[in-house]
Amino acid sequence: MAHRRIFPFLVLVTVGIGLLAGFVATLVDEKDFPSYGDAVWWAIVTLGTVGYGDIVPTTGWGRVVGSALIVFGVTFLTFLTAIVTSLFVSSDQERKQADERVLREASEAETRAILRRLDERLAAIEGRLERGG
């Protein structure tokens, strides 16, 4: 299913965006992000829409990067929620379809058994009629 392949893709893209945003943040706002580690921490927290506030950009370009991260993070969480919900729904639908298939097969087997018994009884009646009685 396509949604099972897109989840790892979204995770990899999000990690990549976090690493890239951390790098860009160190370039555009050296004062607020003195180390790459701090910048990546801020980017990951911002992507997760948590925003602890322990590290914040104060330059215009730093805020532009932060705004883009917030939009991307909210979008990612929306897609993640939709994918997980879709997985649960499709799993439930597959289980219900399997249950319905089992019930249908059992019903068909029962119907065939009834038809066989009716056919046997009909053959016995026809045999009696042919013998005359």
Image (spheres, helix red, strand yellow):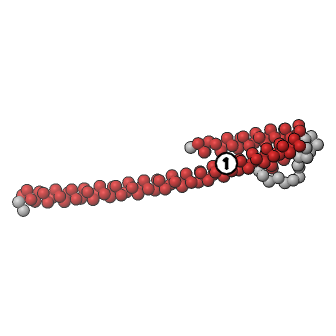
Residue 40, visible in the rendered structure: no
Specify the farthest residue to the bottom.
133
Residue 69, visible in the rendered structure: yes
What residue is shown with label 1?
79
Q: Is residue 24 above or below residue 91?
A: above
Q: Pick the quarter of the image with the N terminus.
A: top right
Specify the farthest residue to the left.
132
Q: Going 42% across and 53% down the picture, which residue do you hit?
A: 101
> Total label count?
1
> What kind of residue is marked 1?
Phe
Q: Nearer the viewer, residue 119 or 63?
A: 63
Horizontal side of 13 relative to 113 (left or right) equals right
Q: Going 87% across and 53% down the picture, which residue do you hit?
A: 53
Q: Provide residue 49's location: percent of width, then percent of height.
A: 78, 52
Q: Provide residue 83's location: percent of width, then percent of height.
A: 63, 49
Q: Residues within 10 Å of mark 1 (few under 14, many from 20)?
A: some
Q: Nearer the viewer, residue 121 or 91?
A: 91
Horizontal side of 76 relative to 132 (left or right) equals right
Q: Is residue 18 above or below residue 111?
A: above
Q: Provide residue 115's location: percent of width, then percent of height.
A: 26, 57
Q: Provide residue 28's location: percent of width, then percent of height.
A: 89, 38
Q: Pick the quarter of the image with the C terminus.
A: bottom left
Q: Secondary structure at mark 1?
A: helix
Q: Going 88% across and 49% down the picture, which residue do you hit?
A: 56
